Amino acid sequence: MATPAKGNSASSHALLSIVIPCFNEEEVIGETLCRLRAFCAELHNLDVELIFVDDGSRDRTRLLLKGFAAEDPQIKLVCFARNFGHQIAVTAGIDAARGDAVVLIDADLQDPPEVILEMVRKWREGYDVVYGTRTERPGESRFKLATARGFYRLLNRLSDVPIPLDTGDFRLMSRKVVTTLQAMPERDRFVRGMVSWVGFNQIALPYRRAERFAGESKYPLRKMIRFATDGILSFSSKPLQLSVAMGMTCASIALAGILYALILRLFTDIWVEGWTALMIAVLFIGGVQLISVGILGEYVGRIYNEIKGRPLYVVNEYIGFREEGPATSR
Ligand code: UDP
Ligand code: MG
């Protein structure tokens, strides 16, 4: 379990941990570090540790990061044994952080580091979570904007806890929140939802999201779908109720059909005939059953995943953590 220790024993300043997940970001990582350093210079009465999580990059990202870490004691590095995905990388960063507050930020400079100053101000006013809400998202495809918009609204309707709209992982969290997150073992992680679930004093901070500095998105459609299903299935059991509703609807339609056929047969000289109606009914009910089994299967698959109890991620090496090591690991 985490001990809320100060990172720098020589200084009595509070410590701010900044967690940066990186996957194949060789084109941006140098610039990101420059911007973060410039921003750190403006911070007063606050020490900073920069925790880069290399999520199994296949380009020069890891090499570059190791170079940076060798020169700068502020930089810490968690290197994964393979690509585990953005949400797991963020989790590993949170686990390793020793800060009194932890900030999550993307490596591609879409979240401007300068906004963190305002987040810190709000944290000092007593807020436990300051989450960035995107007012504008230039440079994203229409498809991404529309699906993201639809997704956050759907998620909010389905979820049992309110999850703020148009909000990514760019946020500051106090030690209280981080300690709670470090103790949450679930595997299909949807970090922004988990932070909402934790509660405490949360506030939105609107900001303008920038374009990606260089390179391309590391979220192909496949990862986006996985991310969206994780969000919905981890925060709602309403899809299961949906299959009940579909079953009820089918049964009602079937009942109406039976009554209709009976009435015709008993009170008139005509009757319902033909196999078309039969086929339609069979296919319809078959379809609904398969959908329901599929929904059930998704939940069962996730239970199986939990029950295996494998570690959430495998770390190849921790670099720059010195003798005290990462705050926690799994
Ligand atoms: N990322 C990661 N692992 C992955 C995919 C992405 O660590 O498997 C990181 C990536 O390096 C970036 C952040 O997650 O820092 C957000 O990814 P990206 O900018 O590609 O997503 P988008 O902004 O396009 O949604
Ligand atoms: Mg991005």
Image (tube, rainbow, N blue to C red):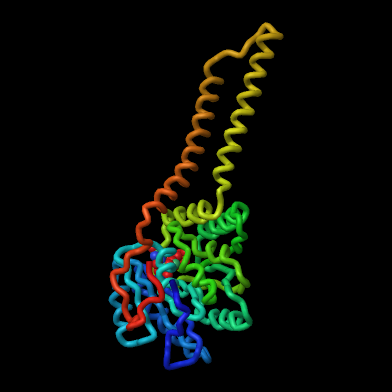
Would you place residue 249 above or below residue 136 in this image? Answer: above
Where residue 5 appears, x then y in whole percent?
45, 82
284 left or right of 264 in image: left
Extreme-bottom residue of the structure? 10
Q: Is the N terminus in the top left, top right, bottom left or bottom right quadrant?
A: bottom left
Kindly tell me whether residue 285 is visible in this rendering: yes
**With 226 as the anchor, is 204 left or right in this view?**
right
Residue at x-position 49% and y-position 30%: 286
Q: Is residue 118 above or below residue 304?
A: below
Q: Along the line of sight, which residue is nearer the eye, 258 or 108?
A: 258
Relative to residue 193, is residue 327 depicted above or below? Answer: below
Q: Position of residue 178 (x, y in %)?
A: 50, 72
The location of residue 244, given as percent across then percent down, is: 58, 37
Q: Residue at x 62, y 80 (%)?
A: 126
* Location of residue 32 (image quadrant): bottom left
The residue most toward the right is 267
The C terminus - image quarter: bottom left
**What residue is drawn where x is 47% and y is 47%?**
299
Measured from the top left, where is residue 4 in percent x and y? 47, 79
